[in-house]
């Protein structure tokens, strides 16, 4: 039996997700469309990326470069937010620029994490302990990021257990299951990916939620099958 963990807590009032076991690759593969522009909230690197003259911050304005930046490994925690048009940063006041610097340094906004001038949808704040904090303008986007993380962990569990790998088809987690998982997030939800092998690949997502010192556990089977073989599990709705 092999376990993989995903921990997530959703703060509904702030549209904030704090999570472990989810990384930037899950963000890239989970959201419907990559941001058009990114501004880094950490130290400036003149050699790696362009610098916006008005804010003095690194920016990335090319889709391929954004994808590469989000998928590559970084020595220091990555912190960024997206913005709509290339020239939007030039309209920020000195106070608003200071608020961006504060956000990157303290990992929390002074006011809202969403700026009406930048029209940003995300604020991504990687933590030194391996966790992430992400503000979603539309919190529904997180469910697809969670699905991508579960698929990635499932494939990692399969590859780590099988010496001679056969092809494995891992579809997206059904919307009904994702909806239930997200409903658990405000209570603090810890998902354990458990793999058991009885002829077919059979993965379960065990969820633990805590509220007022009480713990509840749920077993949710994920639909996973090897190519050419039928799946043995069906989505199980929480009650």
Image: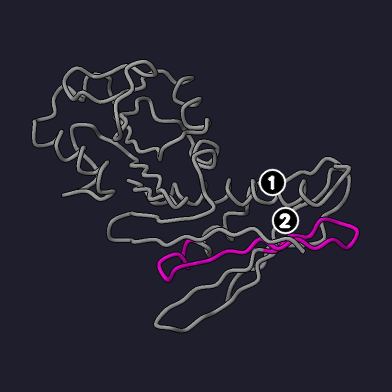
Task: Examine the rendered structure and indicate whether residue 194 appears above or below residue 111.
Answer: below
- Residue 91 pos. (x, y %): 13, 25
| SS label for mark 1 | loop
Give me the C-alpha separation between circle 2 and circle 1: 7 Å
Residue at 45%, 50% in the rendered image: 142
What is the crowding at mark 2: few (fewer than 14 residues within 10 Å), some, or many (at least 20)?
A: many
Residue bearing mark 1: 171
The magenta-colored residue range is: 182-204
| Image-quadrant location for residue 101 | top left
Q: Earlier in the sequence, mark 2 or mark 1?
A: 1
- Residue 212 pos. (x, y %): 39, 82
| Observer-nearest of 199 and 236 | 199
Residue at 65%, 48% in the rendered image: 151
- Residue 105 pos. (x, y %): 25, 43
Q: Is residue 82 left or right of residue 169?
A: left
Query: Most prominent secondary structure in the magenta stretch?
Result: strand
Residue at 40%, 56% in the rendered image: 18
Determine whether label 2 and label 1 are within 8 Å by CB.
Answer: yes
What is the crowding at mark 1: few (fewer than 14 residues within 10 Å), some, or many (at least 20)?
A: few
Quadrant into which the N terminus falls: bottom right
Residue at 42%, 78% in the rendered image: 211
Task: Examine the rendered structure and indicate whether residue 52 appears above or below residue 108.
Answer: above
- Point out the residue furthest to the front here: 75
- Residue 132 pos. (x, y %): 42, 49
Residue bearing mark 2: 223
| Observer-nearest of 126 and 222 | 126
Task: Examine the rendered structure and indicate whether residue 22 appears above or below residue 232.
Answer: above
| SS label for mark 2 | loop
């Amino acid at each position: 039996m092999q376990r993989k963990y995903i921990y997530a807590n959703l703060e509904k009032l702030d549209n904030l997700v704090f999570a472990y076991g989810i990384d930037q690759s899950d963000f890239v593969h989970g959201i419907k469309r990559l941001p058009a522009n990114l501004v880094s909230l950490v130290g400036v690197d003149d050699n790696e990326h362009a610098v916006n003259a008005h804010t003095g911050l690194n920016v990335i304005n090319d889709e391929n470069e954004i994808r590469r930046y989000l998928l590559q490994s970084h020595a220091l925690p990555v912190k960024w937010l997206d913005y709509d048009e290339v020239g939007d940063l030039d309209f920020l006041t000195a106070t608003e620029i200071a608020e961006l610097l504060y956000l990157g340094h303290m990992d929390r906004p002074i006011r809202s994490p969403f700026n009406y001038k930048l029209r940003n949808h995300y604020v991504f704040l990687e933590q030194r302990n391996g966790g992430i904090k992400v503000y979603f303008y539309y919190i529904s986007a997180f469910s697809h990021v969670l699905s991508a993380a579960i698929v990635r962990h499932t494939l990692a569990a399969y590859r780590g257990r099988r010496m001679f790998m056969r092809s494995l088809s891992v579809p997206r987690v059904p919307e009904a299951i994702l909806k239930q998982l997200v409903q658990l997030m405000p209570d603090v939800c810890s998902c354990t990916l458990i793999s058991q092998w009885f002829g077919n690949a059979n993965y379960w997502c065990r969820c633990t939620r805590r509220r007022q010192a009480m713990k509840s556990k749920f077993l949710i089977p994920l639909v996973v099958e090897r190519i050419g073989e039928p799946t043995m599990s069906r989505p199980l709705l929480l009650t």
